[in-house]
Image (cartoon, rainbow, N blue to C red):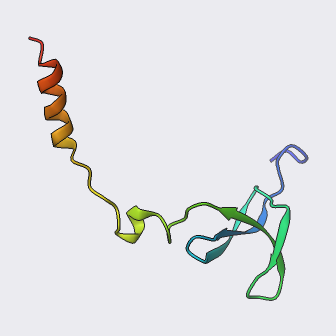
Amino acid sequence: MKPGIHPAYGPVVFRDKAADFAFLTRSTATGDRTVEWEDGRTYPVIDVEISSQSHPFHTGTARVLDTAGRVERFQRRYGSKP
């Protein structure tokens, strides 16, 4: 890689406050705040709105939408054109 044109790539903590969950990974994103991690080191932290611990798809609390009813309602309203 060419030096000087790529952003810094280093360890960052992503924290999901809704689920009280955090994980350490590597990223080019940086945060303004820092947090002390389990290993005793300080890392930049990025707060996220949703993660795999709070997303309905991953937690099994996803609602199933009635897509068949929506299609039928569309067909009744606009009809199928031959």
Q: For the point 13% across and 33% down, which residue is it? A: 72
Q: Which residue lies most toward the right here?
A: 4
Q: For the point 89% across and 48% down, which residue is it? A: 3
How far from the left and from the top, in percent, is residue 17?
63, 71
Quadrant of the frame with the C terminus = top left
How far from the left and from the top, in percent, is residue 48?
64, 61
Would residue 72 be found to the left or right of residue 24 on screen?
Answer: left
How far from the left and from the top, in percent, is residue 81?
12, 13
**Which quadrant of the view contains residue 75?**
top left
Q: For the point 80% across and 77% down, which residue is it? A: 35
Q: For the point 83% across and 56% down, which residue is it? A: 8
Q: Which residue lies most toward the left here?
A: 82
Would residue 62 be found to the left or right of residue 44 on screen?
Answer: left
Would residue 75 be found to the left or right of residue 50 on screen?
Answer: left
Against 48, residue 1 (above or below) is: above
Work out whether residue 10 or residue 65 is closer to the camera in this orientation and state it.
Answer: 65
Q: Which residue lies most toward the front here?
A: 77
